[in-house]
Image (tube, rainbow, N blue to C red):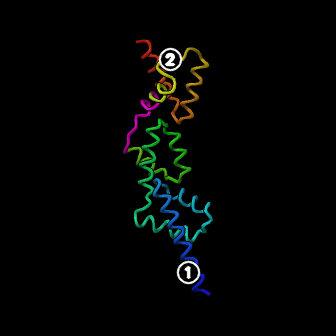
Amino acid sequence: MTDTKKTAQELNQQQAEEVLLRLLARREHSALELKQKLRQRGFTQQPLEAALAKAQQLGWQSDQRFTESWVKQCLEKGDGVRKIQAQAQQKGISEALLQQVLLAHQPDWHQQCYQRLIKKFGEQPPVDQKQRDKMIRHLLQRGFSFDSIKIALQRQSDAAAD
């Protein structure tokens, strides 16, 4: 009976590994994302942890690699530092790892904010307070600091005055 039970556990771990590989074949995932997706598919803790440990040991899954590609995507989308930090926490990325990757990319948050402002609203500065508030709300939701937003709005006004 124990042989049958052991075989079932091994089979469950093998199935978890197969699902994990299919997920990783599509895109990089953080360890937390993979745990959540395997739990949603009904895998228990033991085979889930074993499959993830094997994937990390063999280099199939790396939080470092995931974080680098994910941060690059966020920066290309025009996300601000606050949004990136909030989403990183949800994805199970440590603050230290995130700071290390951001430091390597060295984004200019003021420039990033200005580019997002121009992309969404064009080069014309706001004509009234209502439009200005709309721009500020949009940039705050994208994760930019109020300081970066003020600088971007000032740059937009200066560029229109020239």
The kind of residue tagged 1 is Thr
Dominant SS type (magenta): helix
Check residue 53 for magenta coloring: no
- Among numbered discs 1 and 2, the one appearing first in the sequence: 1
The image position of residue 127, as x and y in percent, is 55, 14
User: Which element carries disc 2, helix, strand or loop?
Assistant: loop
Residue that carries the numbered disc 1 in the rendered image? 7
Q: Nearer the viewer, residue 8 or 107?
A: 8
Q: Residue furthest top?
A: 161
The image position of residue 128, as x and y in percent, is 58, 15
Task: Check disc 1: other Cα within 10 Å, few if <14, some if 14-19, many if 20+.
Answer: few
In the image, residue 128 sits, relative to residue 75, either above or below, namely: above
The image position of residue 144, as x and y in percent, is 51, 34
State the extent of the magenta-drawn residues as a range.
Answer: 104-114
Q: Which mark is residue 125?
A: 2
Task: Check disc 2: other Cα within 10 Å, few if <14, some if 14-19, many if 20+.
Answer: many
In the image, residue 17 sits, relative to residue 74, either above or below, namely: below
In the image, residue 53 sits, relative to residue 86, either above or below, namely: below
User: Which element carries disc 1, helix, strand or loop?
Assistant: helix
Q: Which mark is residue 158?
A: none
Q: Is residue 72 left or right of residue 48?
A: left
Q: Kindly indicate the quadrant of the structure image that contains residue 3.
A: bottom right
The kind of residue tagged 2 is Pro
In the image, residue 50 sits, relative to residue 83, either above or below, namely: below
The image position of residue 9, as x and y in percent, is 57, 76
